[in-house]
């Protein structure tokens, strides 16, 4: 039986929780690169009321517009591509040369702290940045009216900051100091 879209959406939220932040809550163990067995995730999903087949899981991963998850080439393991807050996971991202400008979506209430202190990774392993304004708008809109900040990635590279890019195209960096941030006029 193929799962309904609403069931897949709820399952995806559960997966984000257990594959990024709290695997132990579902009895899962993630390796240092964030991988866990597909069979174990399916078991955990079932115990949480999300009865998915392996085919449903593959369809969920393929349909995820943000590319949050990856399934290993042999189909036996799954992980979240980035966004982990658990100390046990430290994905070895390859350093990447970013475009001159990157973007970060947020909400107006967060602006005073961001403009004073810059972007910090908070509970996550990295600050997440978008390669285009449209994606940053979507990210910011998850919590209200979006505001988009432009990041001077070229200037950061000259200053010695290191960037990474996850498999799903999210740009990652340890922090963005306030001197490298500006408001984009269209979303301010």
Image (cartoon, rainbow, N blue to C red):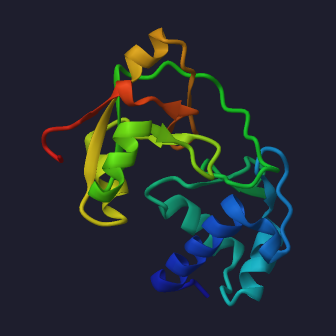
Q: Residue at x 30, y 61 (%)?
A: 141
Pinpoint residue 162: horizontal percent, then vertical percent: 57, 21
Visible residue check, residue 138? yes
Q: Nearer the viewer, residue 58 or 171?
A: 171
Pinpoint residue 79: horizontal percent, then vertical percent: 70, 55
In this image, 58 relative to 44: left or right? left
Pinpoint residue 117: horizontal percent, then vertical percent: 44, 38
Q: Nearer the viewer, residue 157 or 112?
A: 112
Q: Residue at x 13, y 43 (%)?
A: 186
In this image, 152 relative to 20: left or right? left
Extreme residue in the top direction: 158
Q: Residue at x 36, y 64 (%)?
A: 142
In this image, 186 relative to 94: left or right? left
Q: Residue at x 37, y 25 (%)?
A: 180
Please, is residue 28 above or below residue 177 in the view? Answer: below
Pinpoint residue 21: horizontal percent, then vertical percent: 69, 62
The number of numbered badges drawn on the structure is 0
């Amino acid at each position: 039986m193929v799962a309904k879209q609403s069931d897949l959406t709820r399952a995806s939220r559960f997966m984000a929780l257990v594959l990024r932040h709290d695997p132990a809550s579902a009895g899962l163990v993630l390796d240092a690169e964030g991988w866990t067995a597909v069979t174990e995730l399916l078991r955990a999903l079932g115990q949480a009321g999300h009865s998915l087949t392996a085919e449903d899981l593959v369809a969920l991963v393929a349909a995820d517009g943000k590319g949050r998850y990856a399934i290993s080439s042999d189909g036996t393991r799954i992980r979240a591509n980035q966004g982990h807050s658990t100390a046990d996971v430290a994905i070895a991202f390859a350093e990447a040369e970013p475009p001159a400008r990157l973007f970060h979506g947020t909400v107006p209430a967060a602006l005073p702290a961001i403009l004073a202190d810059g972007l910090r990774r908070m509970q996550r392993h990295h600050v997440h940045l978008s390669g285009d304004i449209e994606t940053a708008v979507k990210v910011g809109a998850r919590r209200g009216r979006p505001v988009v900040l432009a990041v001077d990635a070229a200037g950061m590279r000259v200053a010695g900051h290191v960037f990474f890019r996850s498999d799903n195209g999210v740009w990652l960096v340890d922090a963005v100091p306030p001197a490298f941030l500006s408001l984009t006029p269209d979303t301010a």
